[in-house]
Amino acid sequence: MRLVIAQMKHETNTFSPVPTPLARFERGAGPLLEGAAVRAAFKDTGTAIGAFIDLAELAGAEAVYPVAGNAAPSAPVDTAAYEAMAGRIVDAVARGCDAVLLDLHGAMVTRAHDDGEGELLARIRRVAPGVPIGVALDMHTNLFPAMGELATVIAGYQTYPHVDMYETGARAARPILSLLNNKARPTMCFGHRPMLPHVMRQSSLDSPNREIQARAKEMERDGALAATFFVGFPHADIPYAGSSAVVVTDGDAGRARALCDELLDMAWQAREQFVYRVEPLEQSLRRASGLGAGSARPVVLLDHYDNCASGGTMDTMAVLGGILDAGLEDAAAFAICDPQAVAQMTSAGIGARVTLSLGGKMAMPALGLKGRPREVTGTVRRICAGLYRNEGPMARGEQADMGPSAVLDTGKVEIAVISRHVEPHDIASFRALGIEPEKKRYLMLKSRVHWRAGLGPLAAAVIECAGEGVCTSDYSTLKFSRLRRPVYPLDPA
């Protein structure tokens, strides 16, 4: 048995100004992973491709690893980057295999293709029309028909924060292996509902997604090979942005259709609960000031308009500036992505007193915003290379790379300044910088939901701060021109 196992992941924010070249899919100083380096990087990790590796070895299969690339969300993927990765995968399939297992995202837009995943599947089908294809997808998939029509099995994350990446890889791969062993006949149905759930209301820890995902898991316990409800990724001006569902059964198309529609109907009936109401930043910071006094655990301040895991620049200063102006003490902020500032701090050295024009380096034309840096003075406390391994539960064991990084201490706030986009969903991101988040009174995080995976238990309270950025929760500031309409809540239900 010969399996082609590959990863090509990107969540595309079409409003983001952050470019997406091939280098963004790399980690550390090395090139894009391929061959034995893929196995070495992902074996024994809590990732979908890690599950593929384990199941392939358990089955005694020969595995071929043409590429593994995973880039932080940003603007549409450069054509050269897409062709480099997709070309390696298609070439490996063309050389012959019994099945293909793909760790994809599901919301990849490229400079040439609205549906990066569907285009990849179409190319695979042209060289190997009958090969079984199992695909593991993120919960934020924007499912185009090509994905549902061309894949054999699709399974998506059932948790947000995404702490079930490994399990999802297994859910995508096992039906394919059963098919190869003549033990199952995967039959798949998919569908959509015209809704754009706000990301801040998508967590599977909260209603209504909690109940929808619980029902999907129940379907699998009752015999479905895979059942997935995708909340979708709303910051993409493409036709199929929004919610969808996929159910795979063993040869029963009618049941797959009925279960898929059930998940979609649950979501549609709860559509009003997926709408997020924004609180003005000034009001949020006033509440934070009152909550921080006397708290034994940190108050978390979410700068959710500038979350790099949704394509933010990670350099807007509105929320951090508000914290500094409010005089909040004993705080840590993760993070401002500003390679220029890191270089200045590195040149000055640990212990040096520096004044930086921090953040605000990137304009956001899609929102009509210019970058607004802020002058900040402090002491350089730490300098590091920025590599660490996630402790979990999300992406356990996977290497993360925030690039050359440093900590600026203003006396009241320790500011993490990094060179590559990394979201703080793992406590190791702080430890790599020598910051002990559990001992702080306040934590400012450029995150929306993923922080709850590794840092959630630390929080005494959570304040959601509406700053600036292309991850805005205010849909009225996003100019949708290509999205299918009508769609809720942009249009009446």
Image (spheres, rainbow, N blue to C red):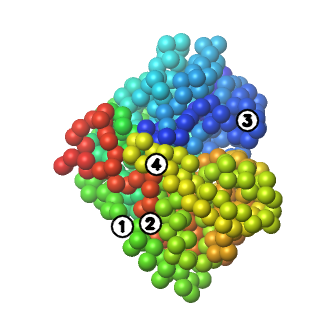
Question: Farthest residue in the left direction?
Answer: 492
Report which residue position mark 4 lands on: 370
**Element type where label 3 sits in the image:** helix
Q: Identity of the amino acid at label 4?
A: Lys
Looking at the rendering, which quadrant does residue 375 occupy? Answer: bottom right
Up/down of 126 relative to 119, above or below: above
Going from the N terminus, do you reach mark 1 or mark 3 first?
A: 3
Q: In the depicted view, which residue is nearer to us: 165 or 195?
A: 195
Q: Give the spatial CA distance, label 1 vs label 3.
A: 45 Å
Location of the N terminus (image quadrant): top right
Kindly identify which residue carries mark 2: 464
Q: CA distance from mark 4 to mark 3?
A: 43 Å
x and y percentages locating residue 243 in the rendered image = 35, 43
Label 2 residue SS: strand
The answer to whether mark 1 and mark 2 are in CB contact below 8 A is yes
- Name the residue: 41% across, 71% down: 282
Tell me if 183 is positioned left or right of 471 in this view: right
